[in-house]
Amino acid sequence: MAALSLRQKQLDLIVRMLHLNQPPPPPPGTAAEQEEEVYKILVLDTFCLSLLSPLLRVADLRKHGVTLYFPIDKPRQQVADAPAVYFLRPTQANADRVAADAAASLYASFHLNFSSALPRPLLDRLAAATAASGSAHRVARLADQYLDFVSLEDNLFSLAHPRSYVALNDPKAADADIEALVDAIALGLFCVAATLGTVPVIRCPRGGPAEMVAAALDARLRDHLLAKPNLFTEASASVASFQRPVLCLLDRNFDLSVGIQHDWSYRPLVHDVLGLKLNKLKMPADKSGPAKTYDLDDSDAFWVANSWSPFPRVAEEIESQLAKYKQDVDEVNQRTGGSKDGIEFDGTDLIGNTKHLMNAVSSLPELTERKKMIDKHTNIATALLGHIKERSLDGYCDCENDMLTKGTVDRSALLGLLRGKGTKEDKLRMAVTYLLSFESPVASELEQVEAALREAEVDMSAFQYVKRVKSLNTQFSASSNTATRSNIVDWAEKLYGQSISVVTAGVKNLLSTGRQLALTRTVEALMEGKPNPEVDSYLLFDPRSPRSGSGGQFKGPFREAIVFMIGGGNYIEYRSLMELAECSQPSKHVIYGATEIVNGVEFIEQLSELGQKAGLGGGVNNPPQLQ
């Protein structure tokens, strides 16, 4: 079975959509390239624009016949002779805007595409509105595309649900709100499965959001499979159980520390410090020039080759590439600079020199691209270096790494960082990492850490929140008496509402041990399918099997896995899973996804918000908000 290629499959479906849901025309130069390209308008909502952003640039849109693209919520002028391709989420507001556009005859024809299935009530509403305005004949096609996710890389996707960790753990969240988010996550994962054309076997721990999403996705897949034909009919005919992927669903509470730690690799640093979003990096204006936006994706050879390297090695590689570029430029200059010793040319020399000149001209575009790439990464590395020096980020990385991987802490280094350089978020992240790294921190040491945070006027909400949840978890695990457990659960529910899933699920991975992440160990065990105490209690949902009984359900081994983190993922976990896939024998293939991709600052802010909602205050007289 070919490796699952989520990004390419999503791109193929989008290109087909841009060609009015027909196969794209053959490439230029072929005999069949006689048909005239249809030029059209593209209309998008905010989510679908972010979905397209990592896949297609403006030049790519033009290549597929899109002359103009507009956001749906902005006023647009009539282009009466052009067809329009709409790509939208299936919401009532979008359906009403489409009906208004059709009524105003903005475009010659309307090709409507929704990122997931348009519910029947909205379809009826749209049909009634277009019929009432006499514009129904303008709607040429309506298609459910099942593309409700953002492919950032071949093996990385996001459902783009912001603040999902807060939403699922908010003590004041209404049941209806949590059910709606769980259903939205299940819908996004259904779209991923539909795009891949395969029904996964689902594994998840008991309790909490992971089980809720697994049950909702299982029900959605089962309902869809009852229809014949369905989205999986063609793909499933030749796929045996052992060729299907396993979908590993986990909740961010499974391992909190990896969500907040500082990392020393280029890609996580760029994401954390400079705010990489949708594979684009916006650099503010400074002394060196105006604001710039850089694409950091597989079109950038330097990024592909070096983005997982430690930052110092990246800086060395930039220097090396610059030296090589200068050497190549000097070589071209020498070749085209005429004879060194001033002897006049004869015919042979003229021909030879002309060849050199032609070679030089042909090498100019490549040299220019290399220079642009070197300048781009020099600017990024310079900006990173400024933050590293200003905030002592190397010290934070070293200290956190020692705590998480060695289980040791240099108290003077820890307190020195908390009292020294770094933003308030940096200090808070390291303090919470300290809290999560030790089962029972030394009381005097913990007091010193808290005192240092107060001295730095750091809002303590996130720290107190994690401290309380960890305390509840420890008490729950230690309680052999059922009545005592029940009391703890009741108390925790009063305090935290939905976040009690942390406690009741008996989270074992709150403390990270060893260099390999808890997530990677778990995924490896689930893919192997052998008895393993870490995952033996995990639930199994197989939408293709009869509902009754679990006997005969396939538990592995699996060659392919989709790993999904509910509550926010990050580049550190993504790297760890890619290393697992590369080092496995025989080779495995892993796709990593999350409700959103968050950096340490964004995640610690969500923890702070939950601490405030739980009434755990700032811990200082007038606690300032996080900057």
Image (cartoon, rainbow, N blue to C red):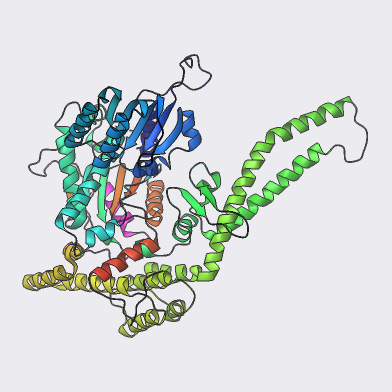
**How many numbered markers are drawn?**
0
> Does 45 sit left or right of 56 as displayed?
left
Question: Would you place residue 104 above or below residue 288 in this image?
Answer: above
**Is residue 464 magenta-colored?**
no
Q: Quadrant of residue 261?
A: bottom left
Q: Quadrant of the N terminus?
A: top left
The residue furthest bottom is 444
Residue, x 28% and y 74% (percent of image)? 464
**Is residue 521 magenta-colored?**
yes
Can you see residue 557? no
Q: Nearer the viewer, residue 625 or 447?
A: 625
Percent x, y of residue 214: 19, 48
Residue, x 23% and y 37% (percent of image)? 199
Percent x, y of residue 236: 24, 30
The residue furthest right is 343
Percent x, y of residue 115: 30, 37
> Does 387 sit left or right of 109 as displayed?
right
Percent x, y of residue 248: 26, 49
Q: Quadrant of the C terminus?
A: bottom left
> Does 321 sit left or right of 451 as displayed?
right
> Does 187 sit left or right of 423 as displayed?
left
Q: Quadrant of residue 230?
A: top left
Q: Nearer the viewer, residue 110 or 585?
A: 110
Residue, x 14% and y 70% (percent of image)? 494
Secondary structure that dominates the magenta span: loop
Residue, x 47% and y 49% (percent of image)? 280
Can you see residue 74? yes
What is the magenta range?
Answer: 505-534
